[in-house]
């Protein structure tokens, strides 16, 4: 722990923080209150949140409808185990999700919801589900997965195995986790042909293909087209390989439709959701399975059942928050807000293209990305954004915005102006450093 941090608050030495070198980290900011699209610090400043608390607070902070519903549920029953018991909030939420997930109403729709408490666990559930699906069908050798470069699916062991092993944050564990098949995302005709050849040749060992649809988020905010997504899904179906979509970051309106998969008109075998599921108020995730997948676990033999059960699975308080969050999507206003955000980001981030050292500027739904030619001065960038009274957390070679959908025009413009201003300063710093070499 650095001296500055320990002098700020000695209690900080007891907390091990995420993705942080604890010996050198700058003093973390002390948040004391949230409201709308802003976070209040202990020194009285308000920061406009440009990343909605790791992409969760889609309705902004402290939405009165969600808070009120949680207060009532807290008085009635904050938690009860889900083994051998059930409760109304979970039953209601599961039924509602099946009505809005891609393919609703079709023969092989995502009709079966397995709840968990975090996105990483939802991914683990999906992987186990896919492996046991084939085992139950008499194909126990089908245990491997195909994933893609720049993928990120979580920090637990199984999830790490399907992340990019070289570019991701999990390269340290290479050799200690199961090695899966990681390939370049097939976007050209030749790449797609090679992908199909891989699936055709691996039908004895492949359990599933897994992909973040349209947006590979934590792997570098990489975009791909609905056509690419559809081609991958069709190839999986043609070659009898399960297709898993990870909509933990992309779901609930972030890419412009309620779920990114809708833009390619696909219906996966398994889907993972989380993050914005509860509007950012409490942790919850889910893994949704098709009738085809679910039916493979039905038997008089208990060993065929799916043996997994998070302690806080289907937590009533979280399910209540999720139901209240879904209420806020029903009138379509949120997707209209996403459309407005997309237009503003497209217009107001465009000047970054002219800044030396900027490689790309791209926008999809309520996601705006400014990509640098190389990752430099990340700590300086983060500090400068805070000085601009905005909360933006660059990582790798990207500065990105994923704000709450309720953000107003002035707040959003404050974010985009801060990005343009700080990236201009960053570019000038790079130029000065090069001149001194």
Image: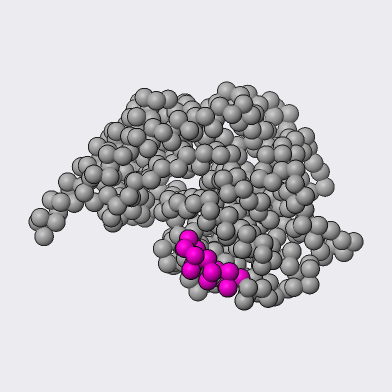
Relative side of 20 to 145, left or right: left
Residue 84, placed above or below residue 412: below
Judge by depth and name the residue closer to the eye, 16 or 390. 390
On the image, the x and y values in percent for residue 80 come to 74, 40
Res. 7 visible in picture: no
On the image, the x and y values in percent for residue 179 come to 54, 72
**Color scheme of the displayed model:** one colour
Name the quadrant containing residue 348.
Answer: top left
On the image, the x and y values in percent for residue 154 come to 53, 55
Residue 113, placed above or below residue 154: above
> What residue appears at the point 67 percent right and 33 percent down from the top-left corner?
323
Residue 279, placed above or below residue 85: above
Q: How many labels does the image show?
A: 0
- Main secondary structure type of the part rendered in magenta: helix
Which of the image's four quarters has the C terminus?
bottom left
Name the quadrant containing residue 129.
Answer: bottom right
Judge by depth and name the residue closer to the eye, 335 or 437. 335
> What residue appears at the point 54 percent right and 64 percent down from the top-left corner?
147
Relative side of 389 to 327, left or right: left
Region rendered in magenta: 185-199
Residue 315 is one of the magenta-drawn residues: no
On the image, the x and y values in percent for residue 332 come to 59, 29
Res. 249 visible in picture: yes
């Amino acid at each position: 722990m650095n001296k500055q941090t320990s002098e700020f608050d000695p209690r900080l030495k007891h907390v091990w923080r995420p993705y942080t070198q604890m010996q050198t980290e700058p003093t973390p900011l002390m948040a004391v209150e949230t409201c709308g699209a802003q976070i209040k610090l202990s020194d009285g400043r308000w920061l406009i949140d440009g990343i909605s608390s790791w992409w969760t607070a889609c309705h902004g902070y402290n939405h009165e409808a969600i808070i009120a519903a949680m207060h009532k549920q807290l008085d009635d029953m904050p938690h009860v185990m889900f083994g051998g018991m059930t409760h109304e909030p979970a039953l209601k939420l599961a039924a509602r999700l099946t009505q809005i997930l891609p393919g609703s109403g079709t023969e092989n729709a995502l009709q079966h919801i397995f709840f968990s408490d975090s996105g990483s666990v939802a991914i683990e559930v999906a992987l186990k589900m896919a492996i046991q699906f084939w085992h139950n069908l008499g194909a126990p050798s089908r245990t491997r997965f195909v994933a893609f470069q720049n993928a990120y699916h979580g920090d637990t062991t199984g999830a790490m195995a399907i992340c990019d092993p070289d570019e991701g944050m999990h390269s340290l564990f290479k050799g200690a986790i199961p090695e899966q098949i990681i390939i370049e995302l097939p976007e050209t005709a030749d790449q797609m042909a090679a992908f199909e050849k891989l699936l055709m040749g691996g039908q004895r060992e492949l359990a599933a293909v897994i992909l973040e649809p349209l947006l590979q988020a934590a792997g570098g905010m990489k975009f791909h087209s609905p056509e690419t997504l559809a081609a991958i899904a069709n190839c999986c179906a043609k070659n009898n390989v399960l297709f898993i979509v990870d909509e933990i970051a992309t779901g609930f309106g972030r890419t412009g439709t309620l779920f990114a998969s809708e833009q390619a008109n696909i219906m996966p075998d398994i889907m993972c959701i989380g993050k914005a599921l509860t509007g950012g108020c409490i942790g919850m995730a889910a893994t949704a399975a098709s009738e085809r997948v679910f039916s493979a676990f039905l038997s008089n033999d208990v060993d065929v059942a799916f043996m997994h059960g998070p302690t806080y699975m289907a937590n009533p308080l979280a399910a209540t928050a999720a139901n209240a969050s879904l209420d806020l999507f029903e009138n379509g206003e949120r997707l209209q807000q996403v459309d407005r955000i997309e237009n503003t980001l497209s217009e107001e981030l465009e000047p970054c293209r002219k800044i030396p050292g900027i490689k790309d500027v791209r926008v999809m739904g309520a996601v705006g990305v400014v990509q640098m030619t190389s990752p430099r001065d990340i700590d300086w960038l983060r500090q400068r954004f805070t000085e601009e009274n905005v909360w933006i957390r660059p990582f790798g070679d990207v500065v990105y915005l994923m704000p709450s959908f309720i953000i107003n025009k002035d707040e959003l413009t404050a974010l985009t102006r801060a990005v343009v201003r700080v990236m201009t300063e960053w570019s000038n710093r790079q130029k000065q450093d090069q001149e001194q070499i």
